[in-house]
Amino acid sequence: MAKFPEADARLFHNIFVCKKCKSKIRAPNLKVFAGKVACRKCGAKALRTVRKK
Ligand SMILES: [Zn+2]
């Protein structure tokens, strides 16, 4: 549902979703892939990228 690239980047770039509690976390890609980012709500390290449907 992206209408223009700027909004797309703002909404999806460096945003991850906790697989456990579904909360959104904004963090740098590299830190997430290095396993250095944990959900601030439940502490889970299982994060996934936001996917548009
Ligand atoms: Zn969580």
Image (tube, grey):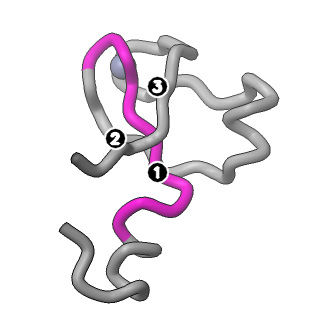
Q: In this rendering, would 13 be left or right of 42?
A: right
Query: Does mark 3 have its CB less than 8 Å from ligand 1?
Result: yes
Q: Quadrant of residue 12?
A: bottom left
Q: CA distance from mark 1 to mark 2?
A: 7 Å
Q: Decide: is 53 above or below 23.
A: below
- What mark, if any, has residue 15 been given in the picture? 1
Would you say the beta carbon of the disc 2 residue lies within 8 angstroms of ligand 1?
Answer: no
Residue annotated with mark 3: 39
Query: Residue 25 or 1: which is nearer the viewer?
Result: 1
- Going from N to C along the chain, the mark reached first, 1 or 2, is 1
Crowd tier of the residue under label 1, counting other residues whose Cα lies within 10 Å: few below 14, some 14–19, many 20 or above:
many
Q: Earlier in the sequence, mark 3 or mark 1?
A: 1
Give the image quarter of residue 8: bottom left
**View quadrant of ligand 1:** top left
- Which portion, as a residue range, is magenta? 11-21
Reply above or below: 19 against 24.
above
